[in-house]
Image (spheres, rainbow, N blue to C red):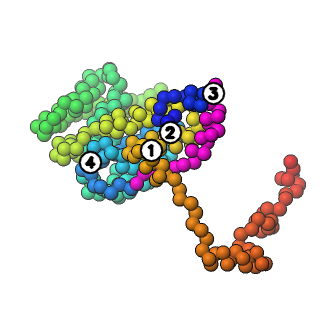
Amino acid sequence: MSWLTGKQTQAEIDGTATGRTFRRDTAWCWDIQPHLKPAETIHHAVLVDGIWIGTWCLLLAISDKGDLLAWQWCGRETTAAWTALLEQVPAPGVIVSDGGSGLPSALRACWPETKHQRCIFHLQMNITRHLTRNPRTAAGKALRELVMNLSSIDDEDTAIAWQLQLEQWWQTFGHLTRERTMFRNGQWGFTHDRLRKAWHLIRKVTRDGVLFTWITYGNPRTTSPLEGGYNSPIRDLLRRHRGMNEAHRRRAVEWFLMLRQLALDDALARALTPAAPEPADDDREEDQHEDIGGPALYDTGLDANEGLWERTGWAGRG
């Protein structure tokens, strides 16, 4: 754990040139899996986000005060993955998210009464991805500037004024989102496809009522505490210890998350699996009967029904 949470290399710790001794002596440590205690406290707001670790996506949930509540590994952000995460946490008053796919359906199933706040920073990033930082058209420039101005809104009056400006943009440039052009391949498509996608995105979050939830309920309006407090340190950890295989990277991240909540001794005490219980007297008697000659329920002998005979022919060639 000193190596994992520190900046020393394996060679520097064991005093060798390659660190091979360190890796051999600590190989068993990777089998110890940390377990986070289920969350019980109901929080005013919960922030959720996902970060990719190799081919795995790690979903995180923290409170509005920065406490880690739960994590969930998944192949991608699906409704089932988000449901598995939300079921570990009592329903809060408000959830703040970056708009990941599958989350709205999971929210309706797990936390139907919880209000939703779309992360304004991620929304601005998504709009910039569609329009770029320097849109070429006047419509694109006006829409991006309007979205970037969301950061300066601080009360209900300025929020209403912003929505009126958005409606004015639609009255002025809305016709561009419906224009079509025949391309060289002979197929029709939208002339301003990027502008259309950006407009549909901002219109959807406005109509869903997830843009200004923070004004009414006083919740955070971005997931920045999660990004700066967890995602960024995780990337830094993996960068310092680059070269680990994917399984070790996942285990390293789990220990990092665990140690954000507990001291090392407490985390180890919770992670260590208790020894298997001693067999009961009834079990011992059954084992004695099997030794005498009774039928064995489980054995190491070969059985033709299990397909364990040595194979011959082409399939059995060495």
Q: For mark 2, does the 10 Å Cα neighbourhood hold few (<14), some (14 to 19), or many (20 or more) residues?
A: few
Query: Do callouts 3 and 4 mark residues in contact (Cβ within 8 Å)?
Result: no
Q: Earlier in the sequence, mark 3 or mark 2?
A: 2
Question: Splitting the image into 4 quarters, where does residue 259 fall?
Answer: top left
The span from disc 3 to disc 2 (Cα, nearest Å) is 19 Å
Residue type for callout 3: Thr
The span from disc 3 to disc 1 (Cα, nearest Å) is 26 Å
Residue type for callout 1: Leu
Q: Residue at x 77, y 78 (%)?
A: 292
The span from disc 3 to disc 4 (Cα, nearest Å) is 49 Å
Q: Which of marks 1 and 4 is nearer the N terminus?
A: 4
Where is mark 3, residue-wise?
16
Where is mark 2, residue-wise?
1
Q: Residue 200: where, in percent of width, then height?
A: 31, 38
Count how many numbered circles sit on residues in the image: 4
Query: Do callouts 2 and 1 mark residues in contact (Cβ within 8 Å)?
Result: yes
Q: Earlier in the sequence, mark 3 or mark 1?
A: 3
Disc sitting over residue 96 in the figure: none
Residue 104 in the figure: left or right of residue 149: right
**Pair 3/4: label in front:** 3
Residue 91 in the figure: left or right of residue 241: left
Q: Which of marks 2 and 1 is nearer the N terminus?
A: 2
Where is mark 1, residue-wise?
264
Where is mark 4, residue-wise?
45
Question: Splitting the image into 4 quarters, where does residue 275 fall?
Answer: bottom right
Residue type for callout 4: Ala
Q: Which residue is drawn at 30% across and 46% down?
A: 63
Above or below, comparing residue 195 to residue 246 in the picture: above
Q: What stretch is highlighted in magenta?
A: 17-37
